[in-house]
Amino acid sequence: PLEGLKVVELAAVLAGPAVGSFFAELGAEVLKIENKTTRGDVTRSWRLANESKENPVSAYYAAVNYGKKSLLLDLTDSADYAMVIEEVKNADILIANFKKGDDEKFGFDYSTVKKVNRGLIYGAITGFGADSDKVAFDVVLQAETGFMSMNGNKGEPPVKMPVAFIDLFAAHQLKEGVLVALLNRYKTGKGAHVSVSLYDAALASLANQATNYLMNDHIPSPMGS
């Protein structure tokens, strides 16, 4: 259903690439730009101890990057930068997860790219919001947003979830925002800046546990299996 749609992905690890893979699965052309100076997305090398090194990429990388065309480029190189800008000019969606200030440093902040593509939908992922310098480590997010305090058995230490669910929560929320922006563009012709933070996505995903606290002042404890 999304054949003919073009997505440029300036994102790495899990949340941003999961959004890109969603659009690729539905038929969109997804161009993933990877950092040439670091040998691409860091998850390319995140292998299990018994995972074959003969495979060109890890299973982790493959989980959210299949169906995309990948280019290894250096955004600080003027020729490489110009190449990506040309791709952005005729793209429908750009997905990015820059650290604070890096979007402006590399010339891919929304105010810059919308000058070359007024109809672009810019989907941004941050760790703790656009104004925060904090680095978003999954275990820290799971602790700070309360998931670890509910997970496990009473009397035992807090337990980390085995999958980076907060990245996936954020990816799902960004997909929703981008799709709504896409629908609005069909109606108005206008692009949009859509953003989500991992922290906000995690809090929003507390669902009934959050309302249990807000309505009944109940703080959940570990619940076992």
Image (tube, rainbow, N blue to C red):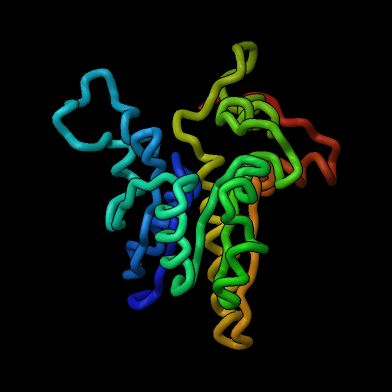
Callout count:
0
Image position of 213 with respect to 8: above or below: above
**Whole-percent x and y of residue 36?**
37, 40
Left or right: where does residue 220 sit relative to residue 102?
Answer: right
**Whole-percent x and y of residue 46?**
34, 28
**Whole-percent x and y of residue 177?**
60, 64
Residue 118 placement: quadrant: bottom right
The answer to whether residue 1 shows anywhere in this view is no
Residue 40 placement: quadrant: top left
Left or right: where does residue 110 sit relative to residue 80?
Answer: right
Write the residue at 71% across / 47% down. Answer: 130
* In the image, farthest residue toward the front: 78
Q: Between residue 141 and residue 213, name the one nearer to us.
A: 141
* In the image, farthest residue toward the bottom: 187
Write the residue at 62% across / 56% down. Answer: 109
Residue 74 placement: quadrant: top left
Q: Between residue 145 and residue 152, name the one nearer to us.
A: 145
Left or right: where does residue 60 sit relative to residue 126?
Answer: left
**The N terminus, quarter of image:** bottom left
Write the residue at 57% across / 55% down. Answer: 108
**Whole-percent x and y of residue 209?**
70, 41
Q: Between residue 16 and residue 219, name the one nearer to us.
A: 16
Write the residue at 42% across / 66% down. Answer: 87
The answer to whether residue 48 shows anywhere in this view is yes
Image position of 223 with respect to 76: above or below: above
